[in-house]
Amino acid sequence: MLPTQAEVLELLTADFADAGFEIEEVRVQANAKPPRLVVVVDGDKALDLDAVAELSRTASERLDQLVVEADEYVLELTSPGIDRPLTTAAHYRRAHGRKVEVTLADGTALAARIGRSDGREVELVLAERGQLSVRRVAIDAIAKAVVQVEFSPPNRRELELAGVSSVSEEEVGK
């Protein structure tokens, strides 16, 4: 029998936190063939292949203690994905320097770059009419914010205003 969401969280939260990650979501898909446990993980550092391998190894060891040997299951460890809306202070902190589409609570839509955040407010770097400006917005005044994929190198000045330091020439496209 597969563990419940609560059991998965109880088993894995401390180990994942020690590795620098937090569990954002657990989905137990008992009706899938084979059954699946999906663990969505996020953190301040990149969820690269080495981190996925280490977290998967840890999760498998812990979960195998709960799952009866006859029960086969697939463990899927994944990140939230680029299209996940930013909803917490940690999300804004992790998106520092990224381009976003923001809708404020009053319905105003903005294209911006995420700047510094203190957990209550976030700086948005705006490019309006060819001018760059910084606007502080309370996180709870943001109805929706989604990171955008950038295909062109970001503007160096825009990154500076966002508080992104150590920008290499390759990152900004010379």
Image (cartoon, grey):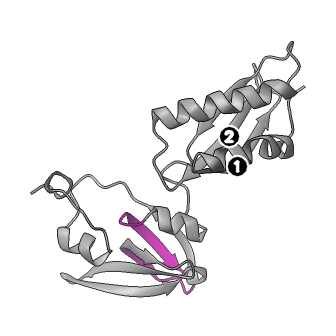
Name the N-terminal-most of marks 2 and 1: 1
In the image, residue 59 lies in the stretch drawn in magenta = no
Q: Is residue 125 left or right of residue 26?
A: left
Tell me where the magenta segment starts and ends, as one range: 96-111
Q: Is residue 158 left or right of residue 143?
A: left
Using the rendered image of the protein, determine whether residue 11 is visible from the camera's viewpoint: yes
Residue 78 on image: x %, y %: 58, 39
102 shown above or below 152: below
Is residue 99 in the magenta section? yes
At label 2, the amino acid type is Val
Is 12 or 42 nearer to us in this picture?
A: 12
Left or right of 24? Residue 72 is: right
Classify residue 30 by image quadrant. top right
Q: Residue 39 carries which label?
A: 2
* Outermost residue to the front: 18
Residue 109, compared with residue 37, is above or below; it is below
* Total marks in image: 2
Q: Is mark 2 on a helix, strand or loop?
A: strand
Amino acid type of the residue that numbered disc 1 sits on in the rendered structure:
Glu
Point 76% across, 25% down: residue:
32
Kindly indicate whether the residue at mark 1 contacts the one at mark 2 (C-beta within 8 angstroms).
yes
**Residue 34 or residue 167, whichever sits in front:** 167
Q: Residue 25 carries which label?
A: 1
Image location (x, y in percent) of residue 58: 67, 32
